[in-house]
Every structure is written in C-alpha cells, then in structure tokens.
Image (cartoon, grey):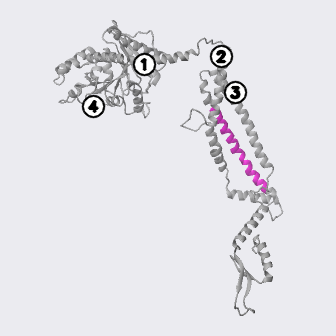
Amino acid sequence: MGNRGMEDLIPLVNKLQDAFSSIGQACNLDLPQIAVVGGQSAGKSSVLENFVGRDFLPRGSGIVTRRPLVLQLISATAEWAEFLHCKGKKFTDFDEVRQEIEAETDRVTGANKGISPVPINLRVYSPHVLNLTLIDLPGITKVPVGDQPVDIEQQIRDMIMQFITRESCLILAVTPANCDLANSDALKLAKDVDPQGMRTIGVITKLDLMDEGTDAREILENKLLPLRRGYIGVVNRSQKDIDGKKDIKAAMEAERKFFLTHSSYRHMAEKMGTPRLQRVLNEQLTNHIRDTLPAFRSKLQSQLLALDKEAEEYRGYRPDDPSRKTKQLLQMVQQFSVDFEKRIEGSGDQVDTVELSGGAKINRIFHERFPFELVKMECDEKEMRREISYAIKNIHGIRTGLFTPDMAFEAIVKKQVIKLKGPCVKCVDMVIQELINTVRQCSNKLESFPMLREETERIVTSHIRDRESRAKDQVLLLIDIQLSYINTNHEDFIGFANAQQRSSQANKSQSSAVNQVIRKGWLTINNISIMKGGAKEYWFVLTAESFSWFKDDEVSRAAICFYNDNGSNHS
C-alpha cells in the first residue's frame, strides 16, 4: 500500500463512522480514532478551533460540549462544513455551524445543561487542514448545574470511558500548564485505561499563563510523567482575544513567536505549536490505523461470516408466504406462553434483582400481605364485650337468663366472619394486578409487532378478568358457607361440652401425676408391742402423697382401689 493509499485510510474510516451513525447504530467495530479528553476550561475547544482556523464551537458557562462531537477534517480546495443530520446542506458561515451545534444539542439533551452520549457528526472541508478525525468529549465537571443530575461527574466519566477503553482509540489528553500535572483529570483517566502511556498523546495548553519564574520544560521534554508519544505545547487565544474576535491566524503567529522567544522553550520551538500538533496527530492516526488494520480486518471478516450464516436462513424467503407467517406467529405466541409460565413458576432465564415480580410477588401477597390484612381486622376487646352484652340482652328481651343464648353467639360470630370478605377480595385484586403486569412484561418481546402485542395483551387480560370474577364468586361462596353453619362440635371449638371434657381430662392427668405410685411391695414389722405374735408381713404402697399398708385380707381391696384411681393395676 503506497502513500496515496495511506492517505485514503482516514476518509475510509470516516465513511464507516457515517454509515453507522446514519442507521442509528453504535459502531462496534472499534474503528481507530482520537478522543479529546480534558477538564473544563482546559482549552480543548480552542485547540480544535485552531485546527480548523475558525470559531465554530459553542462557549459559555457550564458544560460546553454536552454531546460527543465527531469532527472530521478533510483537506479540500474550498472551505465549508456539513452535518450528518443535515444531509445536502453546506454551511459556509461558521457562526451558523455554532448555532446548529447548539440547536442539535438542545434537541436531544434539553436547553438546561443536560448531557447525552449520542454524537454529533460534523465534517469540515478546508485547504488549511490535514485529514484528521477527532471526537471532542464533554469536559469533566465536579458540580452539577441546571437540570444536571447529582451524579453528573460519574455520568461524564462513564461516557468518556466508552470511547477511551477501546484499544483502537488514541487519547488526546489536554491539560492546562497552570495546573499541577499530578492533578490532571485527563491524564488520570488516560492512566486508568492506558497505564503504560502507549495510546496517550499529551497536550499542554495555557503555557503563557504560568506564574513568572515557572515553566513546563520538564513536562514537554517528557521527563516528569513520560508518555510513549510525548507532549506538545500550544498557546491558545485568551478569553479576551475570543471576545474581541481576534483572528486565529494572528493567534497562530503569536503562538509561534512565543515559543521562539521564550528562554525555556526556544530550543524545542519546532516541536511545539498547533501546526505541529496537527501534523503529529495526522501521522499518529494514520500509523495507528495501519497498525490496527490486520486485527480490524480479521474481526470484520468474522462478523461478516456470522452475518452470512444468519442471512442463510432467509435465502429464498417470501414475505407473502402464509405458512411462514403462521409458523412465526405460533412461535411468538408459544414463546409468550413459556415466558409467562416461567415468570410465575420462578424458573425464568431473566432474574429481576431490583424488585419482586411474577410468582414471587404473588407468593408474598398470600404469605405476607393477606395475613397482614387479617391482622388489621382485630377489633377492640372492650368494644367486643359491649357488643356481646347488648346481643345477649336483646335476645332475652324482658326475660333474664342463666346461659348465653345461641342466637346471640351466632350474631356475634357471623359479624366477625363476614369481615373476612374485604381482605379476601383485596387479595384476589392484588394477585390479578400482578398477573396483568406479568402479561405486559412478557409481551415486550412482541414490540416489533405492535398489533399482535396489543391483541395478545387484550385476549389474555380478558381471560384473566373473567377468571377474576369466578374466583371472587368462589371466595364469597366459601365465606357464605361458613356463615350458614357454625360447627360447635369441632375439636378446636371450646364450647360448654368440650370445655367440661377438657377440664376433666386436665384434672385426671394432674391427679395421676400428683398421686403417682413411687414404690410398692411386702413390708415385715418385727417386735412391736402392740402386735401380738411377733413379726408380721404387710402389703405397702408409697405414693407422692401418702404411705399405706394393708393386712392379708385387705390386699385385694387395696389393689382394686389403686386400679380405679390410677388407671392400671399396681398390685
């Protein structure tokens, strides 16, 4: 490939960038490019305007560059500019170029300092430029202004990282000379992604604004913080020069005079200045494209093969083939059904880590929300006692009774049971709403077919609403069943009979435990004066409460007594 071929590399890459931008797709081919990075007021805009030789960038407070600006410089015999979003329109007045950049920025980001990663493509043809493509990125800011979010610094950093993390991207790190190099935002970002300094080109601005007696000689000689591609110093117009419409050509002459006359820089004057920077960038970008071309070609071929394989499925495809349409329709509906089932069953391939949804939320409704609604039903005990008292008195009328009448009991119980209808119906409503939300989530895959999506949601939602009505009827029927008959014989119901039985069982078990036999057997008593005939054997029983002994004729009767008291024969 000869020199002419190398010169055509940059325009070729420009065409690829335009092609991706025109179809609204991000360029994922890692095209070789130069990204301009720097903090606010570092002088990035002035450097780019010096390249073009015209004032064309917006200026003001806050973030000037609020969207990435892809600036394509093309050497030509005439001078004009054109935007990719204004095809066919040539701008010869660069004040109009500035106005169009501001208008296009506001169309996407709003008029109050918002930012956006969507780039603006500007192409400038001029006899005063070399073929070069740069991406001007928003300046790093610390404090949000206007409508900017509180995390504006992190958002800008993330946007810059999208570009400079690519190995095919050269980094033009712009740092003002009156700022400590160790605190440079641009160099810090560049070092994070390019720790060896292989892709970074340093630009030192505002050399004329340094304090008297100081200079940036060690930086420009690449001794302080070395970069493989070195540093280039430039002197831009001051704000006073910009406000006074000082001619850029005059500013370039002043810049050259500064380097030639400054004692610290005149020995390297030929390696400093904006024209030198433009030539170096053109050379570096051309060489960078040449170095990355083999890997770029290999990646492009692999992607081409993958696309060919995908396109093979559609060879011979007839859009009007009814069988293919039917098959596609059935596949999408079937996928919708599978996705819905997975979201309810909990085996989906897309797990939401932000909030509960689908089956998990329904589970929570049943086990947390529904019990909570029931707990809120608990009435005041004092109020309950008052209602019971009134119910009993109203049932008795002029009579006085000894026992609680059944009618009063049922009136109180039914009043409490009927309160269950509210929480139960509310539970059904919450479940139905979650099912409808799940339907909408599953139908997102049908967004390419809006009519199919709308009809699918309508049919499934109608079916769910129909089942909702049936479910509520069934729930209310179950509550009505509970209201129609109160089973007082149930083992969990503590009525008069059950209470008496439980009390008897409790007393018996307590008596059994208290009167438990500790020991029993024969006891021989010797030499007792009150007993005639010497020694004699007695049957004894030792319990927790007493000690008893019996003569021979009393043993059988004692055994019967213990059997009846303790439920087993201890004799």
Residue at point 75%, 58% (across, down): 388
Q: Is residue 435 magenta?
A: yes
Mark 1 highlights which residue?
120
Circle 4 — which element?
helix
Q: What's the amino acid at mark 4?
A: Leu
Circle 2 — which element?
helix
The span from disc 4 to disc 3 (Cα, nearest Å) is: 65 Å
Report the front residue among 469 and 13: 13
Where residue 377 appears, as percent x and y from the top left, is 67, 50
Residue at point 62%, 46% (across, down): 368
Please determine whether, in this image, residue 528 is positioned above or below residue 39. Answer: below
Report the front residue among 202 and 377: 202
Q: Earlier in the sequence, mark 4 or mark 3?
A: 4
Disc on res. 414: none
Q: Earlier in the sequence, mark 4 or mark 2?
A: 4
Q: Earlier in the sequence, mark 2 or mark 3?
A: 2
Please identify the quadrant where the C terminus is shown. bottom right
Mark 4 highlights which residue?
181
Q: What's the amino acid at mark 2?
A: Arg
Dot in front, 1 or 3:
3
Apparent side of residue 203 relative to residue 441 in the rendered image (left or right):
left
The span from disc 1 to disc 2 (Cα, nearest Å) is: 41 Å
Disc on res. 459: 3
Q: What's the amino acid at mark 1?
A: Ile
